[in-house]
Amino acid sequence: MTYPAATPAYRPRIDMWTIGAFCLAVLALLIYSQGWLTLLTGGNVGDTSKSGLIRNLFLPAYAAGVVLLAMSPGATLAALLRQPFLILLMVIVAASLLWSDAPDQTMRRIVALYATTLTGVVLAGRYSWATLAEIMAATFLILGVLCLLLIFGLPGIGKMTEIFPGAWRGVWPEKNALGGNMALGFGLCAAAALLNPRRAWLWWGAAALALLLVLGSTSKTSLISLILGGMALGFVFLVRRGPVSGVMATFAAVVGALGIAGFLLFAADVFLGLLGKDATLTGRTKIWAAVYHQIQLRPWTGYGYGATWDNESGRGALAWITKEAGFRARHAHNSWLEQWLSLGLSGLAAWTLFWLQTFGAAIIAAFRHKGAYLALPYLAVYTLTTLTESIAVTWNDLRWVIFVAIAVKLAWPDPEARR
């Protein structure tokens, strides 16, 4: 008796267009990482937000997003329409031009934000979870290798020489930027390894490199972020093993979250001591108080998208924030206050709804499909970072591109997950 031959497993066709699009996506993410700024300026990055040359160097990333959009317009539109809170947020950003303190700056930054956000939407609409993870992991692998080359080949640039002499900073201007980025990269590379077993050796190696760079940066906050991402990865792994381990992992996660919250609430001084921080979080609480006082003057509208932190006239909100905080800040050092300051209550509400939907979808995804390996660890670290840095709704920023890509992908998952 003979049996019909088994149908071979389907393998997606890889051609030059596919490879070219992959490389184009990685190039765009590399540009948005801003790692090249250190190479361009020799480590003295300073304030480059008003440099016409620097702004123009982001144009290839915008062009890459447009080309990728042209290659898959239908999928991109379908994915975007599944994320209404992102659309609402972008509408409010555009509307802030009507009340902005600096309309010319707001207009320019709206264009940059739209181009940056488009890249994330296109990646989500075009690629599967597995390929999306590899695009991101490849980006951080390249950045990690460049960091090592600078650290050991050009230590005058790759290592800090003033405030924290000898601490690694790689391709970024200071050690916390290296640590924070590589804490995110660790989870992305680990997810790529779990979603692509054939190349797991490569992506686990990239994750190890990210861990090494976090340790070399000596940033304790980044190390805690990396551990948090690793715990989120372990949670997804346990949940996907079966219902029993899933229940146990969920219970442990809830108890652990409540325990950490209680520790921060009742023993914050101990926690800050472990991180080597003072009670002001290196001056952040002073900035938060000053920003909040300015918010109270215009709580409904804010001051316009991207219109506050470059106002050198001495009359705007920045002047009062600087006077109250005692030093010149570059941003609010809190993503939630930043949205309220620039977009008002409507912008803050839209961002909050967008984040809630995304984080909730990531938790649900842990019980449904493997995309959670990429989504949940990144979102856990990203959310922690939003408490002390303004990294949400930001133009020309790699972290925002990845957040948008994951958010849209959670609403528009792979076909098998939708079924």
Image (cartoon, helix red, strand yellow):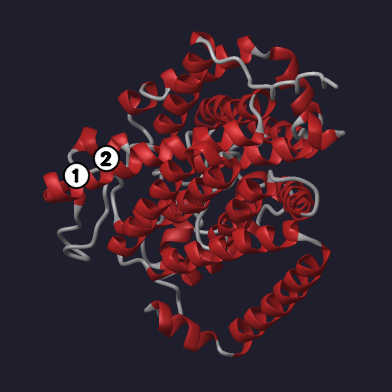
Residue under pointer 2: 146
Q: Which x, y percent locates residue 35? A: 33, 39
Q: Is residue 243 above or below residue 19?
A: below
Q: Nearer the viewer, residue 235 or 411?
A: 235
Q: Secondary structure at mark 2?
A: helix
Q: Which x, y percent locates residue 352? A: 73, 52
Q: Is residue 177 above or below residue 128?
A: below
* Count of marks, rendered view: 2
Give the Cα distance between marks 2 and 1. 6 Å
Q: Which x, y percent locates residue 117? A: 60, 31
Q: Nearer the viewer, residue 216 or 4?
A: 4
Given contact means CB atoms under 8 Å apart, are the residues at marks 2 and 1 in contact? yes
Q: Is residue 29 left or right of residue 119?
A: left
Can the viewer see residue 314? no
Q: Residues within 10 Å of mark 2 (few under 14, many from 20)?
A: some
**Quadrant assignment, res 394:** top right
Quarter the N terminus occupies = top right
Check disc 1 and give the amino acid type: Leu
Check disc 2 and give the amino acid type: Leu
Residue under pointer 1: 150
Identify the residue at horizontal 65%, vertical 48% (top origin).
375
Disc on res. 177: none
Can the viewer see residue 135? yes
Q: Is residue 104 left or right of residue 95?
A: left
Quarter the C terminus occupies = top right
